[in-house]
Image (cartoon, grey):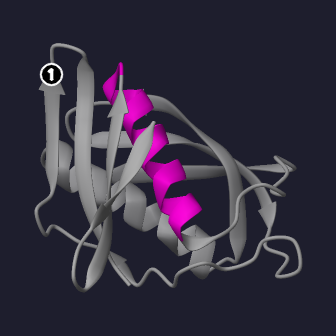
Amino acid sequence: MFELLEHTADIGFRARARTLAELFETAAMALESIAVETEAIEPRQEYRLEATGEDHESLLVNWLSEVLYWMDGEQLAFHHFRVTEITATGVSGRGMGERRDPARHRAKLIVKAVTYHQLRVAETPEGWVAEVYLDI
């Protein structure tokens, strides 16, 4: 699950999950739900997503930036995400969704970028937690 975090110029979220792979899936859904209404999105097609990074933080920023590219650049709306492989320096997975239809997938906020501002990825006794801020 995730919760929104307030910030003066950006918007953020805190995501929690049992595993690191689930954390990346949850963070991607948090990003999606900030940018677009998600209720009417259908999982019609599978899209391959990949990112690399030097550590968990850069890996998460690059993963979310890849998701944002597909959302904005390719005009896709994602129903859900599935991480199929995650290592110390790479993540790959799939986004299930469809072409964005403005009548069914109304825009909420324009997300310009995923930032490193106050970025945090940590393992806790309960699982994993991430705090991410988005430039809007």
Q: In which quarter of the image is residue 12?
A: bottom left
Residue 122 as seen in the image, left or right of residue 23: left
Q: Quadrant of residue 104?
A: bottom right
Residue 36 as seen in the image, left or right of residue 34: right
Q: Identify which residue is drawn at 53% across, 81% down.
A: 109
Front in this rendered view, residue 24 or 55: 24
Residue 13 in magenta stretch? no
Q: Identify which residue is drawn at 82% across, 46% down.
A: 43
Percent of width and height locating residue 84: 51, 29
The kind of secondary structure element at disc 1 is strand
Q: Quadrant of the C terminus?
A: bottom left
Q: Quadrant of residue 73?
A: bottom right
Percent of width and height locating residue 26: 46, 41
Instruction: Note whether residue 136 is visible.
Output: yes
Determine whether 69 is above or below 126 in the image: below
Percent of width and height locating residue 105: 78, 71
Residue 110 as seen in the image, left or right of residue 61: right
Q: In which quarter of the image is the N terminus?
A: top left
Could you tell me what secondary structure mostly forms the magenta stretch? helix
Q: What number of labels is visible?
A: 1
Percent of width and height locating residue 95: 64, 48
Residues drawn in magenta:
18-34
Q: How crowded is the residue under tag 1: few (<14 C-alpha within 10 Å), some, or many (20+)? A: few
Amino acid at dot 1: Thr
Determine whether 32 is above or below 9 in the image: above
Q: Identify which residue is drawn at 23% across, 74% down.
A: 7
Residue 26 in magenta stretch? yes
Q: Identify which residue is drawn at 38% across, 41% down.
A: 91
Which residue is denoted by mark 1 in the rendering?
124
Front in this rendered view, residue 71 or 108: 108
